[in-house]
Amino acid sequence: MSEQTVASPGALNGATEPSVDLRRRRFLTGAATVVGGAGVVAAMVPFLSYWEPSAKARAAGAPVEVDIGKLAEGQMMTVEWRGMPIYILRRTASAVAELPALDGGLRDPASAVDQQPKYAQNAYRSRTPEVFVAVGICTHLGCAPTFRPDVAPADLGADWKGGFFCPCHGSRFDLAGRVFKNVPAPTNLLVPPYTFLTETRLLIGSDAEAQA
């Protein structure tokens, strides 16, 4: 689109000095530029504030204390830490005893892949044989596996000894969060840092060894 120029009466009379209207236009243009610049700065303030972590966001990464005193054998509870579901399972003695027998069908039975703290790189993938703690997110595409403690259910087969089943794409994990072979998930469930404050209280997100 072509720009139209409106001539002032002075220009029609051959005047060379800017008219009052032209000077006013220049002043208004300059003023608008200054105000516009101030507006950009003002607009950036909330934008920059958006990137500053709020107290709530900072608190979201803080350790979470959990009371497991009422968690019975064979039961699992879920808490949230850093926006992720954390599974806490109190395994039965029979379930713990079954774990070594499953090694042949697992992709990484010895937890060679770094998916857990050093203190959980054992047959139980936990600090103690009974209490198992894991991030409840499938290592395939991030779905939430369901807790399936039932033995040999019709939909999972006669070899199922209890564990975690991802309904999204069929990945299977045993009661130590170790992934089975021939499923989409590539690695075992992640074990977060945690420590025991007492026999019945856990602190999720705090690693005593790292703090020592």
Image (cartoon, grey):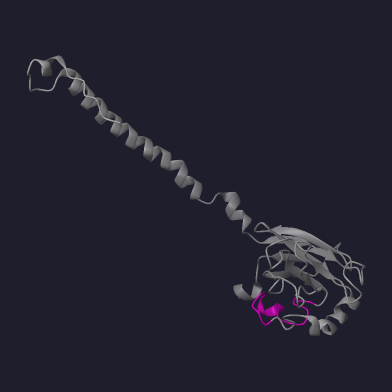
Q: Is residue 200 visible?
A: no
Residue 43 image-quadrant placement: top left
**What percent of the width, then of the height, locates residue 120?**
71, 78
Q: Nearer the viewer, residue 32 or 38?
A: 32
- Magenta span of residues: 112-128
Q: Nearer the viewer, residue 70 or 37?
A: 37
Q: Is residue 105 visible?
A: yes
**What percent of the width, then of the height, locates residue 131?**
80, 71
- Is residue 175 highlighted in magenta? no
| Residue under the image location 37 percent in, 40 percent down | 41
| Residue under the image location 23 percent in, 24 percent down | 25
Q: Is 135 positioned to the left or the right of 150 in the image?
A: left
- Is residue 122 highlighted in magenta? yes
**What percent of the width, then of the height, locates residue 152?**
92, 72
Q: Nearer the viewer, residue 134 or 152?
A: 152
| Residue under the image location 26 percent in, 25 percent down | 28
Q: For the image shown, how many numbered marks are present on the structure?
A: 0
**Magenta residues: mostly which secondary structure?**
loop
**What percent of the width, then of the height, locates residue 7?**
17, 19
Look at the picture and state if 24 lies above or below 40.
above
Look at the picture and state if 2 lies above or below 60.
above
Please identify the quadrant where the N terminus is shown: top left
| Residue under the image location 79 percent in, 71 percent down | 172
